[in-house]
Image (tube, rainbow, N blue to C red):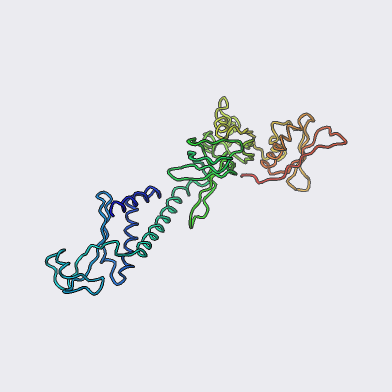
Amino acid sequence: MNEGFFEALAALECENSVEQQLLVEKVEAAMLKAMKKAYPYSEEEDFRIEIDPGTHQFALWMQKTAVDGTPNTPYEVSLAEARLIDPNVQDGDSVECRLDPSEFGRSIAQFAKQSIRGDLRAISREQMLQKFESKEDQIISVQVTQVEPGHGPVTVEYDKTELYLSSKEQIPGETLVEGQMIKVYVTGIVNKAKKPVVRISRVDRGLVRRLFELAVPEIHDGVVEIRSIAREAGFRSKIAVCSLDPNVDAVGACIGPHRSRIETVVRELHGEKIDIIPYSEDPEEFITRALAPATVISTTLAEDGVRAATVIVPNQQLSLAIGNKGQNAKLAAKLTGYKIDIRPEYPDPEKVETVPAREADTEE
């Protein structure tokens, strides 16, 4: 029986990533509860549990009262049997007797198993929280361990913990393969009180922010500041930056020598295009810059205080300003927080082409 017990113990240790000593303590506690349930009139100190994975020793002990004659209760042992343990035992003395685990019956064994499972769930929850609470709003490097066909969820591993990257949190067009190392953004932990689930993403704009913090020392050190980010994952991101040091070019710092820094981020994002925009406190100037690479003739803010603007661009720049499926205009709107109408310099009187890009949340 001992071999089977320690095989099960090893399996629990592996499945739950729990240190052996901690697991042994939890098993001892569960067995103690089961013994107390089986012998409710005994005190806790009447029991002793011996679990030694090194020698594969597993034994249960209980203090019983030696009686001269036939025992009448489970709390008693015959004097003859007691003297096999200790020859000096007298009638009425207490003697430690080894118990046969099979005596407990199936209900008590099931109680012990449930207690152990409950303890393991609590341990797993605590370990999960300890490991990931400090990782919220950060990026971590994970290894892809399983890829479901048809752009299904992807299983990744971080520090012996399995996480799941849902299909909607994967970069469109990106093909992940088993064994590949990728960076993901930890958006948060849900259901902390019961069974914590770590949410990770490759499409959240927070991933772009953290990647630039890693690639650009000036951002990490606080010399260059990211003021806002707009992203269409897998296609394009726009990042507004400013420098707190007049001697440091914010855009140049983000691009890096020979584009080395920005290319590091682009590679991690599966070739996603990235526009680095110099931030401006002047809304008109900021909107004009946000529509890059298009050239803007003029930008006029709405007079009624609404966060909206009308932008005039050269006719030949209209498609560039709007972008494929309105992408450039939408990203500019998200980046600046302004609704933007883009109009050509010389509109066709029969067809005026405008693009109202809805106002979106910005990241301060």
Query: Residue 148: x percent and y percent?
Result: 54, 41
Extreme-top residue of the structure? 258
Q: Residue 101, image x and y in percent?
A: 29, 61
Q: Is residue 270 above or below residue 91?
A: above
The picture places residue 322, in percent across and down from the top left corner, at 74, 35
- Comparing 308 with 136, the one in front is 136
x and y percentages locating residue 311 in the rendered image: 77, 37
Res 31 → quadrant:
bottom left
Q: Is residue 247 visible?
A: no
Q: Say which of 331 and 311 sits in front.
A: 331
| Vertical side of 124 occupied by 89: above or below | below
Choose between 105 and 287: the one closer to the eye: 105
Left or right: 83, with 280 as reference point: left
Please tell me in which quadrant of the rendered image residue 363 appears: top right
Which residue of the protein is positioned furthest toward the left in this rendering? 88
Outermost residue to the right: 350
Judging depth in this view, the residue of 359 and 168 nearest the camera is: 168
Q: Is residue 106 above or below residue 126?
A: below
Q: Is residue 330 above or below residue 256?
A: below
Quadrant placement of the C terminus: top right
Is residue 306 among the parts visible in the rendering? yes
Residue occupying image coordinates x 25% and y 63%: 99
Left or right of 42, for residue 242: right
